[in-house]
Amino acid sequence: MNNAAQTPTGSPARCSKGLVVGLVIGVLALAAVAALFVVKSRRKPVAIPAVRVETPAPVAAGTPAAVPAAAPVVAPVTAASAGEPLRVGGRYSGVVEDVGKQGDGIVKVQGKVVFVTGGRKGDRVEFEVTENLDRFARGRVVGMAAAAAPAAAAAADAPPVDGATATAEEVQPGRVFDVMISEADRRAPDRDGVAKIGGLVVFVSNARPDERVRIRVVQRMTRFARAEVIARPDAAASEAAP
């Protein structure tokens, strides 16, 4: 009877311990929520700077638009009065005193030799310097002075030169030569021929191999020239014979 009426030992202690744990967890949860609320309340909004957009004032009708200033134009420098050293891109003028081995005209600026492509002996040319080296310079013709016209006319009116004894330096536009066509032009063998003057190859239009013709040079390049037939002396002589 006494054993049946006794309460199990330790049951009230277990209940008290569980209640304490639950209270602690609740307090911690409330503390966490309160801390989160405080943090959020202390955050300051980030100020976004205002951007000011300026709209250009409208242009009244008929008002001329602003035009940018033009770049200054550099006048050609005359070889006789040049006071500054030669520079690449500079333009000069002078008289072609001679012709080099490659067929380029020779002009001297302040004592320095300038090989000018397209220049003929005796011509007064305007040229642009394309390369400036220590001992010489190179250039190209960009204009022809009026004084060159009489020289070209005189070359055209001069008597023909025998191509067998002429030099390559003499082969210039307007000059007239008597030559022998040595072979056909490979590009047009049925129409054009090839002659040589002082070792320079001359492509002659409307010419045949083994034909002696009188030609006029129409173009001079560094390694070759082009010419046209203006007479056939052998054919004229055979027609004049009785």
Image: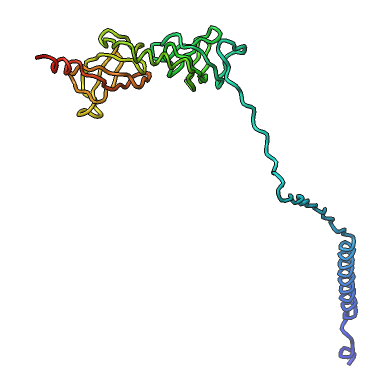
Position of residue 56 relative to residue 126, above or below, is: below
Q: Position of residue 124 (x, y in %)?
A: 48, 14
Query: Is residue 140 something that shows in the picture?
Result: no
Quarter of the image for residue 76 reads: top right
Total labels: the figure holds 0
Relative depth, front residue between 216 and 238: 238
Is residue 194 shown above or below 22?
above
For residue 79, say whether it is visible. yes
| Residue 10 vs residue 232, the one in the foreground | 232
Q: Is residue 48 left or right of residue 206?
A: right
Q: Residue furthest bottom?
A: 1
From the viewer's perspective, tell me whether residue 97 is left or right of residue 160. right
Q: In what quadrant of the picture does the N terminus appear?
A: bottom right
| Residue 111 placement (x, y as % from top left) | 53, 6
- In this picture the colour scheme is rainbow
Q: Position of residue 113 (x, y in %)?
A: 49, 10
Q: Residue furthest left?
A: 242
Vertical placement of residue 143 versus 169, above or below: below
Residue at 51 percent across and 13 percent down: it is: 94
Q: Quadrant of the C terminus?
A: top left
Picture coordinates of residue 40, whole percent (x, y): 86, 63
Of residues 81 and 133, which is closer to you in this image?
A: 81
Q: Is residue 128 left or right of residue 223?
A: right
The residue positioned 20% from the left and 15% from the top of the image is: 233
With 21 as the anchor, is 89 left or right in this view?
A: left
| Residue at x-position 11% and y-position 14% | 241
